[in-house]
Image (tube, rainbow, N blue to C red):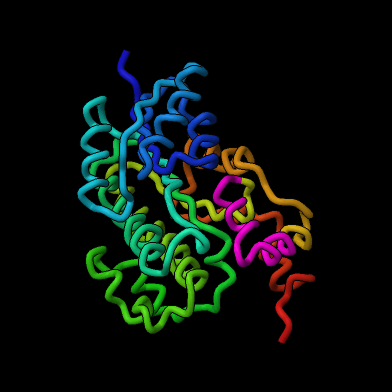
Amino acid sequence: MKKDVMLVTGAGQISMAIARRTGFGKKIILGDKKPENAIAIAKIMNEAGYDVTPIEMDLSSRASILNIIEEAQKYGEIKYLVNGAGVSPSQAPVEAILKVDLYGTAVLLEEVGKVIAEGGAGVTISSQSGWRMPQLSAEEDRLLATTPTEELLALDILKPENIRDTLHAYQMAKRCNEKRVMYECVKWAERGARLNDIAPGIIVTPLAIDEFNGPRGDFYKNMFAKCPAGRPGCADEVANVADLLMSDAGAFITGSTFLIDGGATASYFYGPLQPEQ
């Protein structure tokens, strides 16, 4: 029996949680820059009854993105996309964050959008960080949304001299993710498919633990302690949202970003997390 094909990027806890929730009965192609990570996650899922093929993929490379799409198409039309790949402010320098999280995500959404099957759906993972940075102008948002992918990193607002630090780079990347989803969902609709974004807060994953133990560890711990939920989230809670967005129950939802952060952003603007003036 022919299976629908699901392309999953980033062999991390959030990607795996979404793939486990939505990927049963499907052919899953799992890409990660570190092939050993993809192999390890594929082993866990295959031993639980899923059908997962791991592959090495570098989100910062268009050639690598095209390669994983080509591999996935060997099993049929790609009907689902889960993009959980990326690097954090404590894991990479400014240039890498912009090349992977911003440029790479834009290219992935663009290229998958050219081949996504009718009735298909995709989700990409951004971050609450895109919501707490200073507001951009309408024109700056439009540039992040619509600039041709190969010209994105040449935008003035993304030039190294205009990026303060790795956190600022990460915030800009995640802001761009949300705007690219709005832009690309219009193109995906021409193929009868939908595309949405999920912006998680602090979710306990190996990446988050790196942050807890990094230079901004106290900042992050204070954030979830003072958010309305009073705790960090779990990857399966992100999968709850993805399950809706990728199912028929979410058929009227496209081009949207869903903030799932335990109320941390609300607290940042209107509660105890407000920065001191």
Q: Quadrant of residue 228?
A: bottom right
Is residue 113 rendered magenta in the image? no
Please tell me which residue is depicted at 52% across the width and 18% down the height of the picture. 48
Specify whether 160 is left or right of 131.
Answer: left
**213 w.r.t. 58: above or below:** below
Tell me where residue 272 appears, x and y as whole percent. 79, 71
**Residue 60 x %, y %:** 31, 55
**Quadrant where the N terminus lies?**
top left
Q: Is residue 155 above or below residue 104?
A: below
Residue 254, percent from left and from top? 45, 50
Magenta residues: mostly which secondary structure?
helix
In the image, 166: left or right of 211? left
Residue drawn at x 66%, y 65% as measured from the top left: 265
Q: Residue furthest top?
A: 1
Span colored in magenta: 205-223
Is 214 magenta? The answer is yes
Residue 120 in sight here = no
Please name the residue shown 29% across and 47% down the image. Answer: 113
